[in-house]
Amino acid sequence: MWVLLAIKDSYKRLMSVNYVSAVICDVGNAETQSEEKANLIRAEYEKRLCSMQAELRKLEAAKMEHLKLLRNQSHTEKQLKAYEHDLAEMKKLKVKPE
């Protein structure tokens, strides 16, 4: 009788070891799947980040170009005012352009 109990006890331990083994495998599979999912999310994030950085560089270049154009416009407007002033003085003096 005690042999039968020993065999039954050994069987229970073996089954619990198999169960624990199966649970560990399932956890391992879940970890692998979550690592793969994390890698996919990381790759997508890095792709978006690179895209946004490229867009930021384009926008900064456009901003610099805009500032350059504003400076040129300001300079041109000052020249135009000077020419209009010179023309007004010439009209007062009745000087005709050659």
Image (cartoon, grey):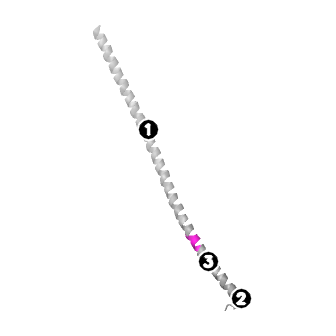
Q: Residue extending furthest top?
A: 1
In whole angstroms, how far apart are the C-alphas of marks 1 and 2? 85 Å
Q: Amino acid at mark 1?
A: Ser
Label 2: how many Cα within 10 Å (few below 14, some 14–19, many 20+) = few
Nearer mark to the viewer, of 1 and 2: 2
Label 1: how many Cα within 10 Å (few below 14, some 14–19, many 20+) = few
Residue visible at 33% across and 17% down in the picture: 11
Q: Nearer the viewer, residue 92 or 51?
A: 92
Q: Which residues are magenta?
A: 68-72
Give residue 9's quadrant in the image. Answer: top left
Report helix, strand or loop for mark 2.
helix
Sequence-first disc among 1 and 2: 1
Find disc 3 in the rendering and name its residue.
78
Find disc 1 in the rendering and name its residue.
34
Residue visible at 59% across and 76% down in the picture: 75
For residue 82, the mark is: none
Find disc 2 in the rendering and name its residue.
92
Report helix, strand or loop for mark 3.
helix
Q: Nearer the viewer, residue 89 or 55?
A: 89
Q: Give the percent coordinates (x, y) of residue 92.
A: 71, 88
In whole angstroms, how far apart are the C-alphas of marks 3 and 1? 65 Å
Sequence-first disc among 3 and 2: 3
Q: In the rendered view, does 2 fall on the left or right side of 48?
A: left
In reply to whether residue 70 is colored magenta, the answer given is yes
Q: Amino acid at mark 2?
A: Lys
